[in-house]
Each structure stands twice: as C-alpha cells, then as structure tokens.
Image: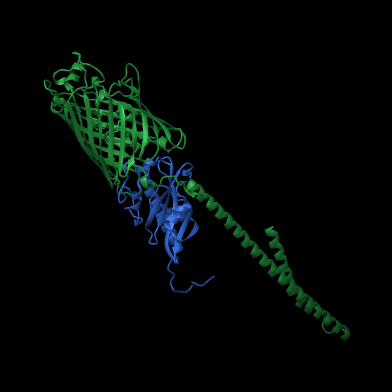
Chain colours: A blue, B green
C-alpha cells in the first residue's frame, strides 16, 4: 500500500492474498471494496499515522462478516524494509484495533523476518503512541528495520481505516428541518 | 455526438412549443363575422382538423422527446457503468502490482517454509553484510565506512605530561561483494581498506575480512566454508558502525576478543527452536604473534598464508526465544603452537581457549549490553621462550575482560520519528596479563579500567554520528583520557 516502487518482484512468498484472507476469516463472507481517498483524507491519514509520506489514494479493503455481523476488515500493505519489500496483511477488528498481522511475502534475507510470536503482540493494539518499536512494540534483535517497517504499516492501515470509517459514518443529523430528500 | 443530440432534442422541444403556442394564434387570427356561413362552417371544420392534427403532432413529439430523454439516460448509465468497470479493473491491477507474487491466484509454494520457524540471526552478519542473501540471483553490492577523530588529554591519570598526538583517520572503507549462484549457493565477501592509504610510508591496510561460500539448506542446518568471521562476542560478527555503540569498538572486544577476527575454515550454522548456533573448524592461532599488551590479537592467521599445523574449534550458542533479547556464549579452542619449537627445541602445544558469555537486550528506548571474555594459554612460558619475552613482557597465561553498557534513546517518545539520539555509558575492565607464568611479571599498565560516556545520533538507520569521552585508568597510573568522534555509514 505504501510504496508502489517496492513491488516485491522476487519475494519469498509465504501466503497469497486468498490464503491470508481464508486464514484470517475462516468461513466468513468477504467483500472487496475499493476506496479513493480525497486529498483531505490522505492528509488526515498521514497525520494520524505520523508517517513521513501520505498514504496512497487507492485503498483496497476486505470486509468480512459472519451471520450478518462484521468480524473484521483486512488491508494489504507492501512497503520497503531496507532495500527490499515486504507485504503484510493487517486485520482491523470492528473496534478499530489490530486483530492480527500476517506476512505474505518478504524479499529481504529471512534473517530479518521476526518470528511469528513477535507479530502476535500487535493483537488488540489501537492507533496510539504505544504502537511503536520505541514504546509498546518489542523490537527484534537484529531485525530492527523489519520491526519498524511492520509497525509503520500497522499505523498506516489503522489511520486509513479510521479515515474510511469516518467517511462511512454520516455525521449525526439533527431530527430537524431541511434534511429532506433531493 | 453528444452536443448534436442535445441540439436535436432542443429543436424538437422548440418545435413543439412553437406549435402549441401557434395554434391559438391561428385561431385568433381567423377573420370573425365577415365570412359567409358555408365558408365559415368549412373554415371551422378546417380549424378543428388542424387542431387535431397539431395535437397529434404534439403528442407524437412529446412521445419522441420522452423516448429521446430515456435513451439519453440509459446511455449515460451505460457509460458510467463502463467507466466504473474500467476503474475496478485498474484498481485490481494496481493491487496485484503492489502485492506482487503474493497477489497471485496460485497458492504459495507448499515447500516454502512458513515463517513459523524463521531463523533469527543465523547468518551472524551485519545488515549490509547479509545483502547477498536477499537477492534473487547474481551480484550484490554493499558496504560500510567509519571516519574517526581521536583527541588525547595532555596529561595522564597521574598528572604527568602525555604525548599522544590527536589524530583523524578514515578508519575503514569496506565493500561487500556477494554473488548468489542459486537458491542454495551464496558467495559473500568483505574487502576492507583501513586508514585510507596502503603504502610503505602509511599505516593503511587492505584486507579481505571474509570470503566464504554458503550452502543454505534449511533453517536448522546450513554449511559455510572459506575465510569466516569467528563467531565470538557481540561485535566481531556485527561490526558495522550502526551495530555497536562507541566511536571506537569496546576495548574488551579488541584486546580479549580481537575483532575483526577471521580465519579460514568450515562448519555449520542454523537455528533450532529458540537457539541459534554456529560451529566451525578453523586454522589455529599462531602463538608467535601473542604479546603482553595485545594478547592473542596478532596471533590470528587472517587467511594470509596462515599456519595450519594446528586447527581449532569455534562456535557459539545464543538463546533468541524472547524478542529484543539475545543471551549466549561462544568459544574458541585449539593449539597455537603450529608445530613451532622453543630455541631449546621443545615443541609447543600452547592450547589456547577463549570463551565469552554475552547478552544484548533492547526494550522500548533502552539498550543494555554486557560481555565477559576470558582467554587461557597453556605453556605460556614456552610461548615466551619462542617469542623471546622476559619479565613483564610475558604473555598472559590468563587474559580477561568484561564490560557493561547502557543506552537510552531519548527520542523514543516520538512514535513516528526515525531519529535516534542515544546517550550511552560503558564501563570496561580488562587485563591481558591477568596471570603470567611463574618466573614472569605482570605489567600493571595492562590492567585497564575505562569509562566511556557518549552520545550517538542516527538521522536514519544507515547513518550514525557518535561522540564520546573515555576516562582510561590503569594500575600503572599511565592511563590517558581521550575524546573520540566517529561518523559511520552502511549501505
């Protein structure tokens, strides 16, 4: 999602998109949605995530529901780790916190890929200052850059999710006059 | 097409309106009473007929207009739908490009190991040094460098004048050149220039620091052969300037563990559960290079026509089961006699054993490091005879040192900032003559205690500027304090 130039052409692929979605939402109905962020939304997402560059305008999300109830939204984010790319799936729970992160592909030496347990610490983390390798996310000995890149991706996804949620929820309309249909 | 259609619809509307308004006008303009009766009747019939005709025409025009309107609407819907379809195709294409191979419909190769058992630091290499493992095939290029300023105090610890001049040097300029033959075989090399110029009147050196071939088989077992880094301590393998604190490397890891220490050999490396290991057989040290001040440092063969009469085992085991923590131990053991004899003709074994225990822990903005290393040299008296050392020039039969280091990134409060600013403090104690053989003496100048207080600034991960002050005391009271400033980079 972040760096288009980071297209993982020679990545080690662990999961495809479909496999990742099945893993995250077994037995759920998954709906693919495309959103086009406005300039204001991009700025807002950048502000929320605290990243140096604005997010991409084109955002694809996968909303999963089971028995008519929303269970989560998945986003895919491809970014540079050092000079090579990593693609992760970030699943956001209905409350807007991270549900899980899965690595789809990784082009850097595998040495710099943290162990799966490291990714589990993201579960339940909302978008705040604790979501940082300098704070609430434990770093990885010898894989600092991956830890940072993944955490940045998580922040970016949560920020975009917030912006999209805000756009989807109409502002509370007063029961008043003037709200007639056009 | 579109403007023309608008015009034609407009014309129809105008025509219909014109007819609608024209009819009464025609009626109004009909002459009233002056017309004869039969003629009047005929005229009225004519008018009715005309009205009917006009009404019919109006209805037809209205129908036609409605049909035209409907057609236009349908056409706009169709065009919108087509644009949406094309946008969706573009969105999917862009998503596929972003996801790369992971976006494919094909399942990930079943033989691809799941990240579940991914190794943690099995390679034992710095960031740039491991670049070749990330390429698909062919050549990879990386490197690092360090420029260093050293400013010495005018007096030693006892207040006597000290004469060490201040210096600047391009301490290291290094090129990593790697070649990935295929998914299994990887060549990795490090070529280093020390102190910029290699010439008879300069102190510079050109060295191959490692050059080995890896056979990568699985996470648990991989093979390596060539000129390899000895897998000891915290700095020897990870010696890129962004990987350690201090403008200079810790002295314990220069004197007791002689970084950058490499020998020719072969062995295995990998990760099993939470344990990472390396185990090599390499050419042994050469006791002829051992000294009182620098310990075993100059005994290293460095892959340069090294003696291979004796071989040594070296290995390390690290626990990496907790993120942010590395705890482990390493060893090097082997004879250093290399078939040499004392002037009296006695063959020297000189079993030399170095071991260390180490820990590195990072949590939030904090970074703690500690290491203890100890060397023992058997038949140290024979080595002294070999080297012609007497009295306090004896090599240490036991050499040891340790350090503790603490740092905190004061910018860690800013979640999104890439900047790092780390004040650090390190305490070191080491002695290359912790014990000497009977009949020899220790030189108290080799018994060193050193504090390092410094600040490391990293604008980005690949660049570091480190400045520190070192308070160096030794048991002979001849220690000289110093300032160091280093600029380091990796790529």
Going by the picture, which residue comes out furthest to the left? B439
Quarter of the view holding residue A26: bottom left
Q: Residue at x 46, y 37 (%)?
A: B136
Above/below status of B325 relative to B213: below
Would residue B277 be seen by someone viewing this image from the given angle? yes
Above/below status of B144 relative to B199: below
Residue B167: horizontal and vertical position, in percent?
27, 25
Left or right: B255 in relation to A62: left
Foreground pick, B337 / B3: B337
Q: Residue at x 26, y 20 (%)?
A: B338
Left or right: B490 in relation to B60: left
Foreground pick, B39 / A177: A177
Above/below status of B465 relative to B307: below
Residue A97: horizontal and vertical position, in percent?
37, 58
Would residue B479 be seen by someone viewing this image from the given angle? no
Foreground pick, B254 / B119: B119
Residue B354: horizontal and vertical position, in percent?
23, 30
Number of callouts in the render?
0
């Amino acid at each position: 999602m972040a760096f288009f130039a980071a297209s993982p052409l020679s990545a080690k692929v662990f999961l495809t998109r479909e496999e990742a979605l099945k893993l995250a939402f077994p037995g759920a109905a998954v709906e693919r949605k495309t959103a086009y962020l406005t300039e204001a939304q991009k700025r807002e997402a950048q502000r929320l995530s605290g990243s140096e560059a604005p997010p991409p305008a084109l955002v694809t999300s996968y909303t999963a529901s089971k028995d008519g109830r929303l269970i989560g939204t998945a986003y895919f984010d491809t970014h540079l780790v050092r000079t090579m790319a990593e693609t992760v799936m970030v699943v956001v729970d209905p409350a807007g916190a991270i549900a899980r992160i899965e690595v789809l592909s990784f082009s850097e030496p595998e040495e710099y890929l943290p162990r799966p347990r490291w990714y589990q610490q993201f579960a339940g983390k909302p978008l705040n200052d604790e979501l940082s390798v300098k704070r609430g996310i434990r770093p990885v000995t010898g894989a600092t850059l991956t830890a940072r890149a993944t955490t940045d991706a998580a922040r970016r996804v949560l920020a975009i999710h917030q912006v999209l949620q805000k756009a989807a929820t109409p502002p509370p309309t007063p029961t008043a006059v003037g709200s007639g249909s056009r | 097409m579109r403007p023309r259609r608008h015009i034609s619809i407009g014309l129809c509307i105008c025509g219909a309106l014109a007819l609608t308004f024209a009819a009464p006008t025609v009626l109004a303009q009909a002459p009233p009473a002056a017309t004869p009766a039969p003629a009047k009747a005929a005229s009225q019939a004519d008018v009715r007929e005309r009205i009917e005709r006009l009404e019919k025409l109006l209805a037809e025009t209205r129908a036609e207009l409605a049909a035209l309107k409907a057609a236009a609407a349908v056409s706009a819907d169709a065009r919108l739908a087509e644009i949406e379809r094309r946008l969706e195709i573009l969105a999917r294409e862009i998503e596929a490009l972003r996801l790369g191979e992971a976006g494919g419909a094909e399942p990930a190769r079943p033989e691809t190991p799941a990240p579940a058992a991914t190794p943690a630091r099995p390679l034992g290499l710095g960031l740039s040094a491991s670049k070749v493992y990330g390429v698909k095939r062919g050549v990879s290029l990386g490197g690092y460098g360090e420029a260093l300023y050293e400013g010495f105090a005018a007096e030693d610890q006892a207040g006597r004048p000290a004469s060490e001049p201040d210096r600047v040097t391009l301490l290291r300029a290094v090129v990593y050149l790697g070649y990935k033959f295929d998914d299994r075989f990887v060549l990795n090399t490090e070529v280093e220039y020390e102190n910029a110029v290699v010439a008879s009147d300069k102190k510079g050196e050109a060295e191959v620091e490692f050059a080995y071939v890896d056979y990568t088989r699985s996470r648990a077992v991989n093979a390596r052969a060539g000129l390899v880094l000895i897998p000891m301590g915290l700095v020897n393998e990870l010696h890129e300037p962004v990987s350690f604190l201090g403008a200079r490397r810790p002295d314990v890891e220069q004197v007791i563990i002689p970084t950058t220490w490499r020998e020719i050999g072969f062995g295995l490396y990998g990760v099993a559960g939470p344990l990472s290991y390396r185990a090599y057989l390499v050419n042994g040290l050469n006791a002829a290079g051992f000294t009182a001040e620098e310990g075993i440092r100059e005994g290293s063969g460095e892959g340069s026509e090294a003696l291979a009469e004796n071989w040594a085992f070296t290995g390390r085991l690290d626990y990496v089961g907790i993120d942010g923590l590395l705890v482990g131990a390493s060893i090097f053991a082997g004879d250093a006699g290399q078939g040499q004899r004392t002037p009296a003709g006695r063959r020297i074994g000189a079993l030399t054993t170095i071991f260390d225990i180490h820990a590195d822990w990072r949590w939030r903005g904090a970074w703690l490091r500690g290491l203890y290393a100890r060397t023992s040299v058997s038949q140290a008296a024979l080595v002294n005879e070999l080297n012609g050392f007497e009295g306090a020039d004896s090599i240490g039969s036991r050499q040891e040192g340790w350090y503790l280091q603490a740092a905190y990134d004061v910018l860690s409060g800013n979640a999104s900032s890439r900047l790092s600013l780390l004040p650090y403090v390190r305490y070191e104690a080491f002695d290359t003559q912790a014990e000497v053989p009977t009949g020899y003496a220790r030189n108290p100048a080799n018994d060193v205690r050193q504090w390092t207080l410094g600040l490391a600034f990293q604008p980005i991960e690949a660049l570091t500027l480190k400045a520190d002050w070192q308070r160096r005391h030794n048991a002979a009271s001849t220690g000289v304090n110093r300032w160091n400033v280093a600029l380091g980079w990796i790529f």
